[in-house]
Amino acid sequence: LGNAGLATGAALFAAGLAVRWAAVLTLGRLFTVQVAIRDGHTLVRRGPYALLRHPSYTGLLLAFAGLAVTFEHALALPVILVPVTLAVVRRVRTEERALADAFGASWADYARQTARLVPGLY
């Protein structure tokens, strides 16, 4: 791959960081490291959340995919992405349970209208 691999990996990494930061900035004070529903918590449906329920994780996965591509080795992608993807899927399930409990029918409606991580895929 050479320079093309490095450029592709860097572009994926930068795009992933941009998506993640857009998600974090959109949530503002509602963004937490721990899964938690705060006082005054609302269901955010604007910005990247209009398309995806978990855009910060989409950005994270995209950034890790970019990192893997820069290694220019066939095993890099699965070695890096499989454990990260498994962790993200587990976290998504935990968050979605908390959000469903907190927002009920409103969450169910939102979940029907948006993809979890990748439109048309998951």
Image: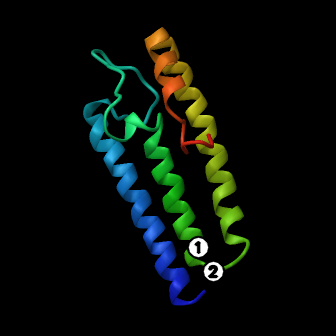
Residue at 39% x, 50% y is 20
Q: Position of residue 81 (x, y in %)?
A: 64, 58
Quarter holding the C terminus is top right
**From the viewer's perspective, is residue 120 above or below residue 3?**
above
In the rendered image, residue 58, in percent from the top left (x then y), is placed at 50, 48
Tell me the residue that label 2 is attached to.
72
Q: Secondary structure at mark 2?
A: loop
Quadrant containing the N terminus is bottom right
Image point (26%, 36%), residue name: 28
Residue picked out by circle 1: 69
Cβ atoms under marks 2 and 1 closer than 8 Å: yes
The structure residue drawn at horizontal position 44% and vertical position 58%, both measured from the top left corner, is 16
Where does residue 103 sit, x and y in percent of width and height?
Answer: 44, 13
Locate residue 69 relative to residue 44 in the image: left or right.
right
For residue 4, side relative to residue 36 (left or right): right
Disc sitting over residue 118 in the figure: none
Residue 96 pos. (x, y %): 54, 25
